[in-house]
Amino acid sequence: MKPYLLHGAVLVAAIAVAAQAAPRSISIEKPWARETVEGQAAGGGFMTIVNNGQREDQLVSASSPASHEVQIHTMSMDGGVMRMRQLTDGLSIPAKGKVELKPRGLHIMFIGLKKPLRPGTSVPVTLKFRHAGSMTAQFKVQAMTAPVPMGGSK
């Protein structure tokens, strides 16, 4: 092997190891999804996003093999009517702060579910952040009657 190729390979390997060892500025706490019934086309996902970094970040998109699309949503009440709206510009996560996605508030929406979400199973969701990059979280499916996540893990 030519010396410059060997040095290049060593440099690439060192960068890869350093990137894996660097602490992430973003972490996900208690990711969970609510159970859905047969034929239900959409479902909700919830979590707390913690930003330990020195600068604001932004959740720009999400995806999951459990649905055709995953959207970031806000929910509000308007004259007794629930209104959900997609946050097409993403969701800001303040530096040294956190944002809670919970029922009746900010959440992710699984659009076009491929099969019902069943309690006791997990749904992988890849979250893409503007600065922190992509990470996958396992959303534990909770029963419809569960008001908050049971156990839950990072």
Image (tube, rainbow, N blue to C red):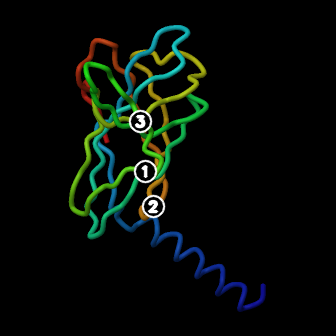
In the rendered image, residue 79, in percent from the top left (x then y), is placed at: 26, 22
Q: Percent position (x, y) of residue 151?
A: 25, 28
For residue 12, side relative to residue 141 (left or right): right
* Residue for badge 3: 85
Mark identifier at residue 90: 1
Q: Residues within 10 Å of mark 1 (few under 14, many from 20)?
A: some
Task: Residue 70: give x, y in percent of width and height.
Answer: 51, 36
Label 1 element class: loop
Q: Mark 1 touching mark 2, by CB under 8 A?
A: yes
Q: Residue furthest front?
A: 79
Q: Amino acid at mark 1?
A: Gly
* CA separation in Å, label 1 and label 2: 9 Å
Give the secondary structure at mark 3: strand
In 3D space, how far apart are the residues under numbered discs 3 and 2 (Cα atoms)?
21 Å
**Side of 3 where 107 appears, left or right:** left
Amino acid type assigned to the residue bearing label 3 in the image: Arg
Taking the spot 33% from the left edge, 62% from the top edge, the residue there is 25
Q: Nearer the viewer, residue 87 or 146?
A: 87
Q: Which mark is residue 130?
A: 2
- Closer to the eye: label 1 or 3: 3
